[in-house]
Each structure stands twice: as C-alpha cells, then as structure tokens.
Amino acid sequence: MTLSPLDELLIYSAATLLVALLLGRRLAVGWMVTVLYGVQLLGLLKLAALAYGGEAVPASFSFEVLGHHLGWRFDALSWFFALITLGSALLSSWYSCGEWERSFRRQGGNLWLFHSALALNVFCMLILLSSGDLLSLFIGWELVSWAGFLLMAMAGGIATQAAMRYITYAMAGAMAIFGGIALVYVSAGSLQYEAIVTAVARMDTAHLWMLVILFSAGFGVKMGLLPFHLWQAPAYAETPGPGSAFLGAISSRMGLFAILLVLVKLFGIINIESLKIPFTLIDARDLLAWIAVLTIILPTFTAMKQNDARHLLAWHGIGQGGYMLLGLVVADAMGGAGGLLHVFNHATYQAALFMAVTAVIHRTGTADLNKLGGLVVRMPLSFLVLLVGIIGLAGLPPMNGFVSKWLVYRSLLNQGMPLLFLASVIGTLGTILSVYKLIHNIFLGQLRVEHEQVKEAPWSMMVPMLILAAIIFVTGLFPGIPLAWVASAQQAVGLPVPDYTLGGVSSGSGSLDMIWVIGVLFAGFGIGALIFYSAGPSKRVHQLDNYAGGHFLTADVRYQYSDNFYAGLMHLIKGWYRGSFLWLESSVRSLVEFLSLGMQGIYRRANAEFYLLSTALFVIAWVVF
Amino acid sequence: MAPVELFVELTLMPLIAFAVGLMMVLMMRRIAARLQRRVGPPFFQPLYDIVKLHGKKTQVSHGLIHDIGIIMAMGGYIAAETLLPVPGMNGIADKGGIITLLYLMMIPSLGLALGVGQCANPNGSIGIARALTAMLAYDIPLVIVIFGVSFAYGSTNLVTLIQAQQAGGFETWGAVQNPVLALAGLIAMHASLGKQPFEIYIAPSEIATGPMVEMGGKYLGGLFVMQCFQLYTSSVLYVSLFLGGGTTWFDFLLKSFLVLAIPVSIAYLFPRYRTEDLLRLMWKWPVMLGLIGLAFVM
C-alpha cells in the first residue's frame, strides 16, 4: 500500500502528538516538537498543488460503520485552513521553547500537558479539516472541542471556569449539530456531501430553516457568534501565553470552516437567501449577516473596556470573526475572498499580538493595562511587533488586515448594503480606539519605577514574533500570494473568484494595488523624514522633563493616563453596556436549574411506589392494546 | 503611462498640495482676523512659521517614537495626496480608490497619537484620547457619505467619480444630485478639520490638556506641515465627491478655497463642544442627514 501525501501529513501529526506524550517531561521536547511541526508543514507543502487548483487528495484509509462510509480527504479549503493551523502551531511552539518554558516550569506549570494539548489540538484540527462526509465532520468536531478544552483548562483557576463554560456551550452546540445531521440523514438518506447537495435542492422551506438554524448555532458556538460569545474571551486569554496565541489565531476559525462547508458548500447561499422571514423584508442570509455585524460591534466595544491586555485581544478575536462571516455570507467574489483572507490575516496578527503581550508578561509579570507604561524604551522590538500587529488588527494600511477588510467593504458596497457597511466600519473605528489604548498603556507614557531595569524579550521569543511581523507586512504588500490560495479555496466551496493580482484586486469599479499604495506611503515617510531631520538636531530629555501645567510632580509617583481611557466616549455610551447577554445566560441557567430541581423533586421525594405502579400499568396497557 | 511622467506627477501632487495648503492656512487666518476686526498676517507668514519652527535652536525630543510619530503624521498625508486627482494629474488614484484614501488619512492621526504617547505627558495622552474619540464621531457620518457617493456612481475610483460628475456639467455634480449627502459631508468635513466648535482635543488656548503639550520646534513645525496637507486634502476630497472635481486649475482652486471658507468662517463664531457633546451632535444630525441621503441614492 502506498501512502498518499495526506496520510503522511496525518502520520507526522500523530507522531508529534506521541513524542509530546511520551517524552514530554524532558526540557528539550519543546524543540523536538517544534521541529516536528516544521516537518508537518513540509508535509503540507507537498500538498501545495491543492492551493493552485489541484485535485482533492483522499486519505487511503476509510471505514464502513453501520453502512455509512467514513472517509477523509483534503481539498483547497482544507489546505488553506491547515496552513494557518500548522503555521500558528509551529510559531507558538517555537515561541514556547527556551526561556518561556523554563519560567513556565518555575511557576509550577505542567509543560508535558501544554505540549501534549497543543499537539493534540493540531492533530484533531487536521482530522476535522480533512473530513470527507458529515459523520467524519462530526467526529472531527467533537475531537476539536475536547482538545480545545484541554488547552483552555490547563491553567487552572479562572481558566478552568472559562473552559467549563466553553465545554457547556460546545456540548449544547454539538447537540444542535447532531440534531441537524440526523435531520439531513432522514431527508437525504446518506451523509455523503454529494447526496446532501442534491437533497437540499428538493428540501422544503421549514426543513431547510431548521437545518440552517441548527448548524449555524452549533458551529457558531465555536466561532463565538452572538449570542454564544461569552465563553471565548476568558477561555482564550487565561491560557498560558503561547497557547493563547495558538487558540486566538486559529481555534475558533474551525467553526468558520464548518459553517463554510455546510452552509455555503452543501446548502448554497442561494438556497439560504430563498428563506424569507415572514412579514419582514429580510431573509436568512440577511439574518446571518446581521449576526455577523453585531458580532463585530459588540465584542469590539467590550474589548475597549478591558483592563487586561490578553482579555482585550481575545475580545477583539471574537469581533474579527464577524468580518470573516460577513464576507462569506455576502458571498460574492470579493466578499468571499475578503472573509477567507481575513482568516489568514487575523491568524498572523493575533498570534503576534498575543506573543508580544506574553513577552511583556514574561518580563514584567503583569498584563494589567493600569500597571504598565513607557516600556518602549526597554522593549523596543516587542513594541515594533505590537505596533505592526495593531495596525493589522485595526485594518489600516500598510498591514495585511487592511486588504481583507477592504475586500469585505467593497463587497458590501457592490451589493448595496449600506447599513452593514456602516456597521463594519464602526467596528474598525472602535478597534482603532481600543488598540491605541493597548499600545499606549503598555509601551507609551511614563515608565514605572519598578520597570526601569526590564530587558527586551529573549531571542527565542523574539524570533517567532519578528517572523510573524514580517509575514503581516509582506502579505500586506503582496496580498496576491495568499489570495491565490484563497481563490482555490473559494472554488472548492463553489464561490466566485475575484480577479486578483500580486498587489491586490483589479475591478472595473475600483481596484486596489497595495504595492503602489505602500510604495507611495513609504516614499511619503521618507520625505517626511527628510523635512524632519533637515532641521537642527534635537536633544533627548528625561521622561519626567515635561510640562505639567503648573503642578509639581515628584519622581516617585509616575503619572500615567490609563484608567477610563476614553472618558468622553464612555460618558456618552456607558449606559449602553447593559450586560444583556450575561443576563440572558444567567436566566437560561436559572431556568435549567429550576427545571432540574423540579424533576429531582418529583423523582426523589414523591412516592416511588406510585410511579412504579403507574409505569407498570402503562406498560401493561401498552402491551395489551 | 510612461514611468517618468508618473514619477513627475507623484512628485508634483504633494508639492502642489503643500503650496495650496499654505495658502489655505493663510486664508483661514485672514478670515479669523477679519471676523475679529484685525488685519491678519502677511502672505508668506505660514511659510515663515514653518521655517522658524524648524530653525529653532532648542529641539526637545522625548525619544525615537516621538520623532517617528511626526514623520508618520507628515508622510501619511504626503502619500494621500497622490491618491487625490487634480486637473490633468491622476497619480495613482486608480490603484487605491476612496476607501484606501479614507484609511490612509488615518495614518497621520495614528502617527500623532504614537508621538504624543511617547512624550510621557498625561495631559498629552488625554488630548489623544479625545482626538481619537472625535475621529470616531466624525468618521461615522463621513463613511455614510462616502458609501452613498460610491454607490450612486457604482465605483470607488475617484477618477471615475469625477468624470461622472463632469459628464453633464453643473447638473451632474454630486451636490446637485445628492444635496442631503453633500450637507452631511460638509458637517463631517468641518469636524474632521478640528476647528471650532469641534476643537476640544486640540484645545489651543489651554495647552496643558492637548496633544501639542510637548510639541515645540520642528515637532510643532511638522504638525504645521501636516495641517497644511489636512486642509488641502479635506477640501479637495469634498470638491471631488460633490463639486465635480476640477476641469481647469482655476475652477479647481476656486472651489477648494470656497469649500474650505465655509467651515472656517463658521468656526470663529463659536465656542466649543465637550467631547461627549461632539459625539452626540455628530451621531445625530450628520448621521441622520446621511441616512436620508442614502435612502435617496438606494
């Protein structure tokens, strides 16, 4: 038997997991595992033909279970998500090697668990990404859910609570998906993708509605779509640093992958669009789009209020997921490309941002935005990485986040969706405010007395961060590189493909060429520098040598404006933060508690004999008649 | 287009923008002076100011990011000018379009914010928090307006937008076709200039709570240069969106100066709004007008 390239990839991944499990207690294992992630990435590159229009590659093993064929295969969509998964795993694992590992162990962290959980996550994600029918998709889905739980729960304390919340949501979601799969099976008689596509075409409206609701709710839990978003930020933020980087980069995108596969590829956006909501002008697609923009806006403005850098980033991670779904639901050439490209771009800058924040925690011991400040003079390279990352996150040129958001904006413009467009731009503006608070409170402003001796992050952490920063910039300069992969992935799910070039997209109604835009931008910076440095030399002064408006400041107390940063804005909008979703969650919880208490009461307290008798009578009556 | 020709355009466009921007600053000061019954500064005063500020002997730097912030503030606008078509020159307008221009115009704000942050003065940081809040306030109506105009003409390419407006003379101007959007755009543009009554974040008369608190010498000079570009960019963008761009340099400049004269004349008659009132005003009137205008376009 010859092994297909997909078999090799899965074997490498399983080998990585085994090495982490068996040798995980030795300190050198981090490097070994990192090298093995590199090998997995090479294995994936052997499948690179997929990303340029190649045929899907099947795995050579398959099962027959109760008459169902269970198969695994890789197409361009799987390849695209697998590239991001393995890239983030490689860099996160690399980042964790060396000094971070030693300090993690000193603080009592379980390194074996960390490496095993990461390797398990990667393996399960590859299984999910290669699923070839709905049953294997469900198996992969459950594996990913539980593997994610392991990584989230390992830190203990708040993290475990958050992970418990996650697994509760995930199980509810899995029930919804399972119900959906059962419904599909009843109407299609098979769980193969082809059979489902033909079955959907002759499905009645009520049936399809049910399926769309069940699947988008089930997969939406993982993505953190509203109203299922509450678990995500604490769960991702409290994980050990490199784990946060990995989870934030790719984990919740598995939900997007599944939504894309089921709703776009199997059901088809046209069918979803045909589901009108009675007495309104909107249909199921609009509903999904509005859920997406609410997912953009509300978590972004929640992020703005966070005082912990990791929580701030994790909340933005939820918000950015909204852009991806929005683009894919609009589902024209530019929207689909923007949504998928944003998955890649988001993974790069989110990983970089979590790594930079973890580097700060590593050196200062805190991520509290009210206890930092002025670190740019002590940690200039980390500042640079964070700056590149926040420009990407905010979606400004010259970084890659701009390109994917531009594509989403353009698709909304082409389709004539002004309110969705406006809402997505409000999300971007909110992000700009929020990320400036992040960089200001950590790196700008006054350096605290206790941080005067802080050193730059070690090279073992710095190198992966710099690599990510370089990727963020280069894919912003040449978006055509990832757009080629995105185009193949779009074709794999049956979406139209935009006319992309190396520098962006060309279109009759307005093109984008980032090579020119960035070239001109840097030329502008060059001229600005010429003007600036043509004037006389400046004298560097101490940070306390500044104008205090007549107040006398002592050197013992550092004045840093960090708390309630956007006071004027909050003055107006603070009443809008009502915690409605927390209220909703707690009311559902109370309801469940109440019901279970009632059931328990009936079951335990009342006469057991009476129930036994009545059940027996019922059974006898049923048998007799 | 020949590379040499393009290079000449890319060089000339920012240069012209700077020269026109200087004159716009002069116009702004002269209008203020007339309203306050003064004579106002001489013709070359804005240029003298920039030269003077750059030539100061004492230049105080708070670190590299302080310097880079100023460079970004100037460089972002210099780049933005090449995306803004002027009569006879399109630069790289067809390679970016209006959304890219809108986002490029945020780079100077980001640069200023970074530079001020490095100054380690809490008063400066308060100013930046207010400036970014103001940006959130005026960009929302601005974005509605930009969506409306691009949707009405079916393009984000400024060259196409201008050609479509010039096609039928005065009657096809954006301001005639979509007057409500044009009004909303004018209010949003006024706020984006940071002039009274929307200048709480610059707060020139109480310097201790604004972004400029640690800026002196060439730092202030760089921001002065940025202001020249900002005035030019805002008014030319408005002319391109609503007043049919320019067919000749004469009508182009005439329109640009006239457009700018409106907010500038209003500005010096007013005190200022607090940050939250600025938000409330911006999110109410221009947004409402913009949405009504959008309803006409759709």
Image (cartoon, coloured by chain):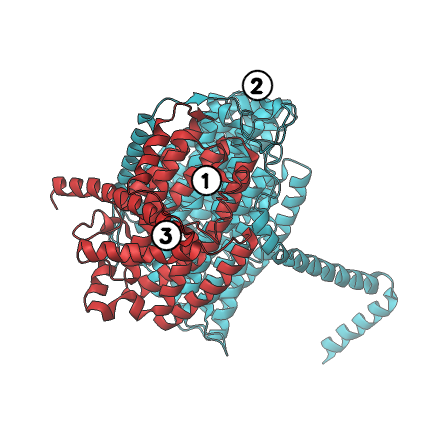
Chain colours: A cyan, B red
Judging from the image, mark 1 belongs to the subunit labelled: A
Relative height, residue A466 to residue A482 (above, below): above
* Mark nearer the viewer, 3 or 1: 3
Residue at (49%, 70%) from the top-left corner? A209
Asked if residue A247 is positioned above or below residue A490 in the image, the reply reads above
Which is more toward the observer, B216 or A511? B216
Determine which residue is flagged by label 2. A453
How busy is the neighbourhood of tag 3: few (under 14 within 10 Å), some, or many (20 plus)?
Answer: some
Q: Secondary structure at mark 1?
A: helix
Given the image, what chain letter belongs to the residue carrying mark 3? Answer: B
Q: Quadrant of the C terminus of chain A?
A: bottom right
Circle number at residue B31: 3
Q: Which residue is mark 1?
A: A390
Question: Badge 1: few (under 14), some or many (20 or more) residues near its Cα, within 10 Å?
Answer: many
Please tell me which residue is depicted at 53% across the width and 38% down the height of the picture: B125
Instruction: Tell me the CA gap for discs 3 and 1.
Output: 40 Å
Tell me if A366 is positioned left or right of B7 in this view: right
Q: Position of residue A520 (x, y in %)?
A: 27, 40
Do the numbered discs 3 and 1 sit on residues whose CB atoms are within 8 Å?
no
Q: Is residue A529 visible?
A: yes
Q: Report helix, strand or loop for mark 3.
A: helix
Q: Amino acid at mark 1?
A: Ile
